[in-house]
Amino acid sequence: MSNNKKFVEAITAMDEDFAQWYTDIVKKAELIDYSSVKGCMIIRPYGYAIWENIQKELDSKFKETGHENVYMPMFIPKSLLQKEADHVEGFAPEVAWVTHGGHDELVEPLAVRPTSETLFCEHYSKTIESYNDLPRLYNQWCSVVRWEKTTRPFLRTTEFLWQEGHTAHATAEEAQEETLQMLNVYADFLENFLAIPVIKGQKTDKEKFAGAKATYTIESLMHDGKALQSGTSHNFGDGFAKAFDIQYTDKNSKRQYVHQTSWGMTTRVIGALIMVHGDDSGLVLPPKVAPTQVMVIPIAQHKEGVIEKATELKNRIASVARVKIDTSDKMPGWKFNEYEMKGIPVRVEIGPKDIEKNQAVLVRRDTREKIFVSLDNLEQSISDLLVDIHENLYNKALDNRTQKTFEAKNMVELKEIADTKPGFIKAMWCNDLACEEKIKEDVGLTSRCIPFEQEQVSDECVCCGKKTETMVYWGKAY
Amino acid sequence: MSNNKKFVEAITAMDEDFAQWYTDIVKKAELIDYSSVKGCMIIRPYGYAIWENIQKELDSKFKETGHENVYMPMFIPKSLLQKEADHVEGFAPEVAWVTHGGHDELVEPLAVRPTSETLFCEHYSKTIESYNDLPRLYNQWCSVVRWEKTTRPFLRTTEFLWQEGHTAHATAEEAQEETLQMLNVYADFLENFLAIPVIKGQKTDKEKFAGAKATYTIESLMHDGKALQSGTSHNFGDGFAKAFDIQYTDKNSKRQYVHQTSWGMTTRVIGALIMVHGDDSGLVLPPKVAPTQVMVIPIAQHKEGVIEKATELKNRIASVARVKIDTSDKMPGWKFNEYEMKGIPVRVEIGPKDIEKNQAVLVRRDTREKIFVSLDNLEQSISDLLVDIHENLYNKALDNRTQKTFEAKNMVELKEIADTKPGFIKAMWCNDLACEEKIKEDVGLTSRCIPFEQEQVSDECVCCGKKTETMVYWGKAY
């Protein structure tokens, strides 16, 4: 894990400087490192182990819902990227271009994929012929590149890791079902695996994906009251199918365009994990995603029998949790700090006095509560505690969101809340782009989503006063 | 899987045109597809499922031997790539260069990684401080790009998937141990998982990795007598450490350079799988790597009880193997062809007469033998058969290699064998580059490796006649 040479240094307090607190954590918990490649990050073993757990869980959900993994080239010829007009317009400003191969200039520049719709579409146009070939349910795990001016680890980097699902269906209804199904897979994953509550909803036209008919999103609220778009699912209708001529022969021998979707989740959810659950001692990981769920630390380990007993406990715990033991010669206090910084959900302390009393001390990372448990029921105590920690983290995050969700009926209220109370603001909107733009300009808020669960905050647009029944979550976002 | 519209078409016979046979298989078994990205391939679900099994097995071996996964940026600034002189000289001719980000020209071009030594070295120079930080045992799964003029699916593509291990050690001995340990992991993997026998040995200086002190390789022989380098492990000594200033403080507080290794295996092993085991009916997959190990096909499935019984068998087999059932309305003959093309190791046929006799028909993909087994011991019969198929495939491949391995004592013999008998040729070599180059020029053979298991074919260099004790495997290679 880490080296011996120093105590973990304290990190900046959250309330003092949230951005610096975040940067401190990603470095001190050894999630990432910077390199000479501007805007890109090195994901270190501990950060990557978190991503591996995310991948494993999501991948099994994708396979359960009938999806297959594939791998597309990382390059997209310029002419192919330009085939769908809205799509290229949206992505062109942030594309990295390969212009030379070896010592030769290329005849046609290649984009390093910012997303792979165009490649999937080209493949589908060649391989889909009849209704028997549908639905086509593909996913790929890869990295993509979007040229960014300002970057922050996990949240916005020039290169990031993600998965992108791409599906083709016979009917518009099936495509819409798939779009919502995958949004629900993401929502369940965030809530049940990462302990992060989400708002499900639809993006406004201004905020939707370049080339999509409709974009759906899950939005989560960070500890500082800023929103994070945590996963998106797009219904393309037949727009790409028409641009790429993806047709199939239906049961009546008629040629029809397919209806498509795409959906993606990225390494930025690791940023969400940090900013939703972390505290002034470092990272706090929900048990299901934690690479190590339990760390056993022997106390007074030079005393006879302590290391043996601690090792025995570790082996017993291994039947119910991902567990490690630290028998290095560092001081226990150093170890406590180190594993708190890394957000390991449970610490088990065992020393000579505990052995005498047939007990162990469990220390929860989330509440820092110490629990004395009998060694007789150790496995059960650990299992129960892990479940409890997950629930507590989820509820804490939900409380934070509830406390930081406000309502505004007019621009004066909207501005006052935006200026003084970071969080989500629920406000009515007339569906007019002009109002959405005015709110951004005057108040600095963007529409996060039109939630599926609508509420009637008032009956007038917060901006222009026009009658409306549409409620929108507004916020400042990462 | 596939669509209904046609019988699988026959493929070119191996002996008629091996290259065309190979191309037919990768297309007809639906392993890959071409795209408009020249030199790159689309890995389709069936091909990618094979790669996923390879990844899963290798990754568990890497973790068992103490390695951790990380992710480095895909870009390398030109100045960083140039830091180690031999390394950049070796890779510069095949690098793809990003010169523009968005609408702006970059101040410094970025290489799309052809391999990541330079990035790992930069990271190590920042994060390794004392002997406590060693050994550093990292691996990464990613894609890399090498600009190739002539490409073939899996064997040589502009972009390919691989893993690259990068380690740093306190001593030269430890680095050498690691280098050979990982070579052995690869060799065991090919032999025990892919059923491909390998020759382990060292590359000559001419053939070693750009920047390495020594490169070790496993070489396998394809059905057509051509060799395939199937995995390499490099000892860098302290060359990169000096170029990148990677030093640690030893126990005596003295600064020392680290000793490094790297090792990689790529999607080209899928090419080896095809060319070692395949036949004129298509792919033949060894059971351990096969995405589907057993395919159950009901015969006369419209008859009462057949589909039910076949499904029951499928569920029973699921306890011992990865199994699927095909109850589609295609003809059994169509299904047989389709799954033979895909190389599924065992086909289970079950029809009304079999049900009457309490039996099933197992058809081996490797020998096409039909075996009638009692349903009472079905699980055991399947398990045993899968083991037997693995062994048979391994032995067949070993026989092929033995039959196609020759010896030559002088240039006349060497040339005659090279011109008429495709395969490995064992011949003595004086360790002189001039002779190695002359053999390439005059006979068209490259040195595959100096095998660990040396034999005394003669006591003189096959080329110049100088006394030597070094025996080399020569061949034509993919």
Image (spheres, coloured by chain):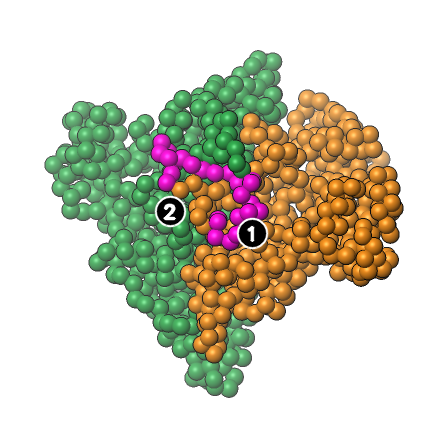
Chain colours: A orange, B green
Query: Can residue B374 be found in the magenta stretch?
Result: no
* Residue occupied by mark 1: A86
Of B137 and B461, the residue lying toward us: B137
Pointer 2 chain: B
Q: Residue A358 in the image: x percent, y percent?
A: 83, 43
Disc on res. B378: none
**Residues drawn in magenta:** A81-107
Find residue A330 and report its image quarter: top right
Q: Residue A241 in the image: x percent, y percent?
A: 50, 61
How crowded is the residue under tag 1: few (<14 C-alpha within 10 Å), some, or many (20+)? Answer: some
Label 2 sits on a secondary structure element that is: loop
Find residue A99 and report its image quarter: top left
Of B12 and B108, the residue lying toward us: B108
Locate the N terminus of chain A and report the quarter of the image it occupies.
top right
Disc 2, disc 1: CB below 8 Å? no
Residue B357 seen: no
